[in-house]
Image (spheres, helix red, strand yellow):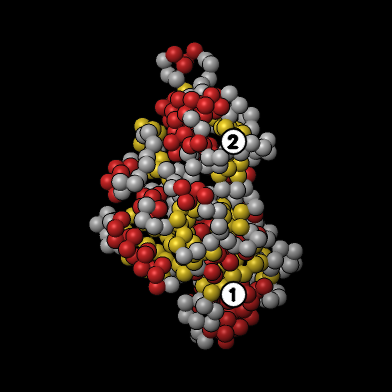
Amino acid sequence: MIISSLPFKQFKDRVSSSGISFRVGPFSVNVRSSIDTVISGIYLLYSNYHILDDDFIDFWIHLQQPKNLRRWYRPQVVFNLDGFQPFKPLPLSQAFAFFEWGLNWAVAKHANRYLLLHSAVLEKNNRALILPAPPGSGKSTLCAALSLSGWRLLTDEMALTQLSDGMIRPLARPVSLKNESINIIRAFSKEAVIGNIAKDTTKGDVAHLKADKQAVSDQSCPAPQWLVSPVYTPEAKAVLEPMDKAEMFMHTVNNCFNYNVLGPDAFHATTRLVEQCDCYHFSYSQLDDAIGLFDKLAFES
Amino acid sequence: MKNRPWTTDSRFPILWSQWDKGRENESSVIYHMGTGDTHQLDVLSAMILQIVESGPVSTNELARRLSTQSGLDADDDFYLYIENTLSRFQQLNLISHAV
């Protein structure tokens, strides 16, 4: 049973009381909250996720409004993970974004059976395009556009590289869009389903693009084929240039969440990843050009 | 000081990954088990570290072997490069003077 099969009223009651449990990639999550934007955000953007009825849950998440006097003039939201509050409260208007950021953090802190890269991953013909990049490089915008153009979304934020075999485990979740990217993606595709905008966050305005149904349901693990370091460059033509393997290795390490935790295992996993992949620098300004180039790459390989 | 041998610590092996070995664009990364740090090395630096890793070696002997391996003249600039590289490796705790 998927979330959208519940009538909204029933869904809301469940989230507000015991919480709703659902599967996100390899993880099980329970979210409990009475905050309207969290409830409606999950109902809209996680509608295709499978509801879980078992009690074994990886991440118990509770978003609530603190019951202090400040709530009367500056309402806030608190993020609880497994009964702990890892972060300071944020403005209530950012509650859904807080859920997304908190879940990112939970995965990054706990999923050490994977090499975790700050990276988007998309798939075509069972081959994975991995886009490790720091914030501000245009990774999410490119990822959103590719996911709306026939590439399967595996993740916008965190690549899960299996230590056992180097394959990429899907973790399809809403794509985080910031500032101008929100309208760029709205204009890019009529298919784009985008949630409410959280204004004035530390990252600016943030909204999330819904992952399509196939991305959520397809749990097959593609092999890495392309490692690409993307950089949005105003006015630039879309250009892919081969990147030195050692340079890509260091770029990948610099975008790895748990390299120091995994130590030599991370070194071996990164070596395998770099050796498996064709490595490129990529600069672009126009999404259509970028997609054309990646489609050509996928076709020719 | 120049002839005091350099060595790596055998308790903390260095893991290597290398690409395009033997070619002009050869590139290497290493993981040092002692510090947990990863470094990218250029071709000559990698050769220097591999010579030290193979057994205690003085700077002069290292320069002689590197000159033979690389085909580069062992002039003053060559020595300076080696000394700077060894100093950098020492700062990174990759090598030390043999006791």
Q: Nearer the viewer, residue A25 or A272?
A: A25
* Residue depicted at 42% across the width and 57% down the height: A151
User: Amino acid type of disc 1?
Assistant: Ile
Viewed as shown, does residue B10 lie left or right of A293?
A: right
**Secondary-structure class at tag 2:** strand
Q: Quadrant of residue A62?
A: top right
Residue A237 horizontal/vertical position (percent): 27, 62
Q: Nearer the viewer, residue A47 or B65?
A: A47
Image quarter of the C terminus of chain A:
bottom left
Viewed as shown, does residue A209 lie left or right of B42?
A: left
Using the image, tell me which numbered label, if any, was put on residue A21: 2
Q: Mark 2 lies on which chain?
A: A
Viewed as shown, does residue B75 lie left or right of A148?
A: right
* Residue depicted at 52% across the width and 49% down the height: A217
Image quarter of the N terminus of chain A:
top right
Residue A38 horizontal/vertical position (percent): 47, 30
Residue A258 horizontal/vertical position (percent): 59, 51
Q: How crowded is mark 1: few (under 14 residues within 10 Å), some or many (20 or more)?
A: some
Viewed as shown, does residue B58 lie left or right of A74?
A: right
User: Amino acid type of disc 2?
Assistant: Ser
Using the image, tell me which numbered label, if any, was put on residue A59: none
Residue A134 horizontal/vertical position (percent): 44, 51
| Distance (Cα) linking label 1 and label 2 | 56 Å
Q: Name the residue under label 1.
A: B48
* Residue depicted at 52% across the width and 53% down the height: A218
Q: Is residue A172 visible?
A: no
Q: Which of A71 and A144 is in front in this view?
A: A144
Q: Which chain carries label 1?
A: B
Please say if the residues under marks 1 and 2 sit with CB atoms less than 8 Å apart: no
